[in-house]
Amino acid sequence: MNGPEDWDRYGPQDPEGPGRPCPGRGERPRIPSPRRPAEDQGPLPDVRASRPDGPQRDKDQPEERETPQEPRTPEQRRTSEDAATEKDAATEKDGTTDQDPAGAGLPEPPHAVLKSLLGAWALAACSPEETAAVEAHLTDCAACADEALRLRDAVGLLHPADSLDLDPLLRSRVLENCLGRRPARIPVPDWAGPYDAETAKLDALLRDMGESEWRAPVRLRWFENDREAGRTTTVAGVIGHLMSVDGLVATALGLADPLGAEVPEEAPTDPTERTLAYWRTGVHEESPLATREPWREQSHALIRTVAFAGRGVAELAVPYGDFRLPLRDSLLERAFECWVHAGDIADAVDYPYEAPAAHHMHGMVDLAARLLPSALAVRRRAGLAAPPRRLVEAGTPGRTLHLEVEGSGGGHWYIALDSPGALGTPDRTVAHIALDSVEFCQLAAGHVSPEDAAAGQHGERDAIREVLFATASLSRL
């Protein structure tokens, strides 16, 4: 037994078992629960024999107690007898006995072992036997119960590990938050936002690529003369293609042409001829890593120039071979092509790539829908589409197709079928097409054929077919 000096130095020891600490100094000691009379439970167990490091005793040798029990008062004896009676009643009710075969002969693990299992118990990583032992110990040891509660609360703060890949939209969110706190002195126009966002996403994809990935083969696809066309190049070749066509916007703004002396003389503004002229230089094959920096610097220069130029620059005409686009639509078209070819690169290097933001996607779909009447007229002049059924004056309603684009950035558009100058109106609708926004953009990029487009169709079949093929004809190299 502990003397007064032991109590001061080590704290009291639990009389129910050796090695189990009781409350510390200054705390109220825990009173053990009443015991049943020895004559009701049979012979007393050999405690020392069950200890792995304790002295062994012969079974026939009577147990030696360290100190005699202090005599109990009549009130304590009555309390003990009442508790024993209640325990006997509970045992008879559930059919269990004190001498359970499943736990017979198994000593209780030491306090140090049970304390070391608290972390695993909080994570639900203990075996059923360990869980039962720990939970039984927690009912007796206040210190371990407090520790277990803290560990269980800490487990609630844990969460699954996030992906190490950065969110492609992280830059946009950071810039939006920064500009919300302190607006830019010279902000980027809203109509230039899609190009700024898509070039930033592609730049983030290219940042960590090695030379072997820059040489990975990429299949470019488009739709030409009602047939699928394609050409294989490398990741560096795709970036060179984007830089060459972006050069049309750069020269319209008075910036240097990235092709320099390699500009094709016969068709200096034709996107396909400009791309082929760049590929003939072989720069993308000799030093593929050197392709990213010129493209990146050019895209930054375009955004800076547009931001400083003011509102009047939005209507500046940008030539694309046989047609022209205002600068606001030209940058939207360049954002669309940047997203499409970034998806081609991501597929080549087996990397996921996100679609544009909803309001940027809506602008891309809107541009394609506005170009469809002109695309229909071009196909008719080339003999690829049936002639108009009824010509109307410019600005008056005519036969209309209702284009419904669902999903992110979708909406409703009414396409004039007989003349580019006619008005599309709901009351003159003769056909209806429903497409998902991403699938519509893939059709406009030439990545999905008109026959394979999963479109909900209703109305005149010829009008539906002509609009689907006209959408695919918007694509090019």
Image (cartoon, rainbow, N blue to C red):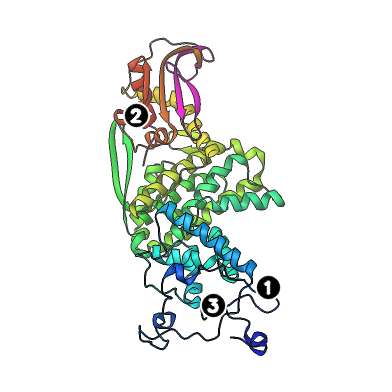
Task: Looking at the picture, tell me which residue is in the foreground, 198 or 357.
Answer: 357
Q: Which residue is mark 2?
A: 454
Q: Earlier in the sequence, mark 1 or mark 2?
A: 1
Residue holding disc 3: 20
- When asked about the image quadrant of residue 439, the answer is top left
Classify 10 Å Cα crowding around label 3: few (below 14), some (14-19), many (20 and above). Answer: some
| Residue located beneath label 1 in the image | 28
Label 1, label 3: how far apart the Cα atoms are:
16 Å
Image quadrant for the N terminus?
bottom right
Q: Which residues are magenta?
A: 394-423
Q: Amino acid at mark 1?
A: Arg
Please say if 53 is above or below 207.
below
Q: Nearer the viewer, residue 186 or 430?
A: 430
Q: Residues within 10 Å of mark 1 (few under 14, many from 20)?
A: few
For marks 1 and 2, give the CA distance: 77 Å
Q: Position of residue 285 (x, y in %)?
A: 33, 60
Q: Quadrant of residue 42?
A: bottom left
Q: Does residue 258 lie above or below 454 as drawn? A: below
Counting residues from the start of the chain, the first of labels 2 and 3 encountered is 3
**Camera-side mark, 1 or 2:** 1
Residue 156, percent from left and from top: 55, 58
**Is 255 contained in the magenta span?**
no
Check if residue 395 falls in the magenta segment: yes
Q: CA distance from mark 2 to mark 3?
A: 73 Å
